[in-house]
Image (cartoon, rainbow, N blue to C red):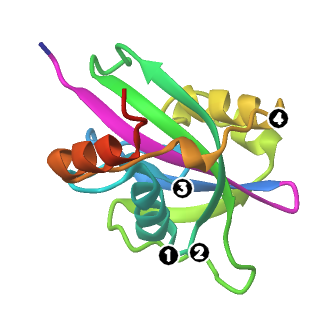
Amino acid sequence: MQSIHVTVAAVIRKNDRYLIVEETDSKGATVYNQPAGHVEVGESIIDAIGREVNEETGLTFNPIYLIGNYFLSPATNGKHYLRFCFFGDVPDTETPIPQDPDIVAAHWMTLDEICNLGRSLRSALVLKCLEDFLAGQKYPLEQFHYCDNELKLADLCYTRLPQL
């Protein structure tokens, strides 16, 4: 059975422009994406989105809400992805400076400019996340729970559940 890659992505808007990263894919082609990446072992979903935005843009990301989750199975590369896309903001005082060597540049682009990238987009999920953002989809961050110790979690839940 193939594994499922858990990824995060960010929609960041400033003055009707969206932050898009220009990156090199595994085949050496230049593609465009939202700041995004894989969740690492031992990392919460919320921590992952902050880390990925910082690595790819050098910016400090403050997630405000979840736009949606997206299961792409399979993607055009044959892999399976579960993406969590967040809306949030970054400080006005910071300038995008990519930290990841695979990121060529970070650009503030209009929606039309992004749509005109066509097949240069890393994934159709870039457009789907923007579409859902513009439609007003919002889900609270409180739905995300992270645990690195299942036995401790069981003990906590047991003490809080009503005794039958």
Residue 7: assigned label: none
4 or 2: mark nearer the eye: 4
Q: Earlier in the sequence, mark 4 or mark 2?
A: 2
Q: Earlier in the sequence, mark 1 or mark 2?
A: 1
In the rendered image, is residue 28 in sight?
A: no
What distance separates the C-alpha of mark 1 from that of mark 2?
6 Å
Q: Which secondary structure type mostly characterizes the magenta part of the structure? A: strand
| Residue 42 appears left or right of 135 | left
Which range of residues does the magenta coloring cover? 2-16
- The answer to whether the residues at label 1 and label 2 have Cβ atoms under 8 Å apart is yes
Residue visible at 26% across and 48% down?
Answer: 153
Q: Earlier in the sequence, mark 2 or mark 3?
A: 3
- Local crowd size for mark 4, using a 10 Å CA cut-off: few (<14), some (14–19), many (≥20): few
What distance separates the C-alpha of mark 2 from that of mark 3?
10 Å
What distance separates the C-alpha of mark 1 from that of mark 4?
27 Å
Which three-letter amino acid code belongs to the residue tagged 1? Gly
Which three-letter amino acid code belongs to the residue tagged 4? Gly
Q: Check disc 3 and report the residue beneath it.
A: 21
Q: State the residue in front, 105 or 148.
A: 148
Q: Check disc 4 and report the residue beneath it.
A: 136
| Residue 114 appears left or right of 72 | right
Q: Check disc 2 and report the residue beneath it.
A: 96
Residue 58: assigned label: 1
